[in-house]
């Protein structure tokens, strides 16, 4: 069993001659060529807006029946607070935070795609004390949400609080059947370190997201042209050892690579594929 490897989003004109022979006008235009090379992709855009059924069906028709997806759950559900429309800087509580009703509406919209999704990811921002009083409160709210999620939904959680990465957190994920998302990202501990501590508490699937460091800095360096490696990462060797260990233990692994990780997700994937060989 090999990991499924794909990118975080996919419609980048600067991938022409790396992945694509031509550019497109819409994201769906890129998917046929993308899916001829990679077997999974992360849908990042749904984090910012709830999708419509037309888009869901277009994505499905653009790829073959064996192609897989991971996708972010809309931040309407994962943001604890929101800014008022009057432009005030004062945050107000999000009434839809971990709303099972909104999540059910989202599931209904993407229903045709559900059999092809390996992880529906709740991505949380960094939660300071003004947004979340404590890890215990967060875990209680998350557990209450998860207990209402329909059986068989591949729910995954990605957190930005390294102080939440404790046994209590992983025990709750394990008991609720939630997938942990390993996020290799600035201000978070190395995922290999997290795996060494808590790998024994993982469920049957894991998602590894290679996100990288300072987004603004690498965007300045690349001018948002994602066709070359500009920040090579030595830790890839240890991450692939971790991946192989997960697979040897019978775990299903999906790796999503972001352009911001090294400067070009397709070229990072080429390095990963070579390391796996």
Image (spheres, rainbow, N blue to C red):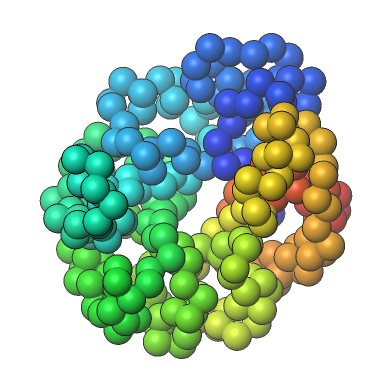
Q: Is residue 147 above or below residue 5?
A: below
Instruction: Judge whether residue 97 can be spotted in this image.
Output: yes
How many numbered circles does the render carry? 0
Tell me which corner region of the image, top left, top right, bottom left or bottom right, holds residue 71: top left
Question: Image check: 146 left or right of 259?
Answer: left
> Which residue is painted at 66% across and 79% down in the image?
193
For this rendering, which residue is in front, 107 or 134? 134
Q: Position of residue 178 (x, y in %)?
A: 38, 67
Tell me which corner region of the image, top left, top right, bottom left or bottom right, holds residue 127: bottom left
Question: Image check: 73 left or right of 119?
Answer: left
> Which residue is painted at 57% across and 62% down in the image?
183
For this rendering, which residue is in front, 53 or 189? 189
Question: Image check: 220 left or right of 85?
Answer: right
Question: Image check: 256 left or right of 170?
Answer: right
> Which residue is painted at 51% across and 76% down in the image?
162
**Placement of the N terminus among the 4 image quadrants:** bottom right
Tell me which corner region of the image, top left, top right, bottom left or bottom right, holds residue 30: top right
Q: Position of residue 148 (x, y in %)?
A: 18, 63
> Which residue is painted at 32% across and 45% down in the image?
74
For this rendering, which residue is in front, 56 or 247? 56
Q: Is residue 218 above or below residue 110?
A: below
Q: Position of residue 159 (x, y in %)?
A: 45, 66
Seen from this angle, which residue lies furthest front? 88
Q: Position of residue 197 (x, y in %)?
A: 60, 85
């Amino acid at each position: 069993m090999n990991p499924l490897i794909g990118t975080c989003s996919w419609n980048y004109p600067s991938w022409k001659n790396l992945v694509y022979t031509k550019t497109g006008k819409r994201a769906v235009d890129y998917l046929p060529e993308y899916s001829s090379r990679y077997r999974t992709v992360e849908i990042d855009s749904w984090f910012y807006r709830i999708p419509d059924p037309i888009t869901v069906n277009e994505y499905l028709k653009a790829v073959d029946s064996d192609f897989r997806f991971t996708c972010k759950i809309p931040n309407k559900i994962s943001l604890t607070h929101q800014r008022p429309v009057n432009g005030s800087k004062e945050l107000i509580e999000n009434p839809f935070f971990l709303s099972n009703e909104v999540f059910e509406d989202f599931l209904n919209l993407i229903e045709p795609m559900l059999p092809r999704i390996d992880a529906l990811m709740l991505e949380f921002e960094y939660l300071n004390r003004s947004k979340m009083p404590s890890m215990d409160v967060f875990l209680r709210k998350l557990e209450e949400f998860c207990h209402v999620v329909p059986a068989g939904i591949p729910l995954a959680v990605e957190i930005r609080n390294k102080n939440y990465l404790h046994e209590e957190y992983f025990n709750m994920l394990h008991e609720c059947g939630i997938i942990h998302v390993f996020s290799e990202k600035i201000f978070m501990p190395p995922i290999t370190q997290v795996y060494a501590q808590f790998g024994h508490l993982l469920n049957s699937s894991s998602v590894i997201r290679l996100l990288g460091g300072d987004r603004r800095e690498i965007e300045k360096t690349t001018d948002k042209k994602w066709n070359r490696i500009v920040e090579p990462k030595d830790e890839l060797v240890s991450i692939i050892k971790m991946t192989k260990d997960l697979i040897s233990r019978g775990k299903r692994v999906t790796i999503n690579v972001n352009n911001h990780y090294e400067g070009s997700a397709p070229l990072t994937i080429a390095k990963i594929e070579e390391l796996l060989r």
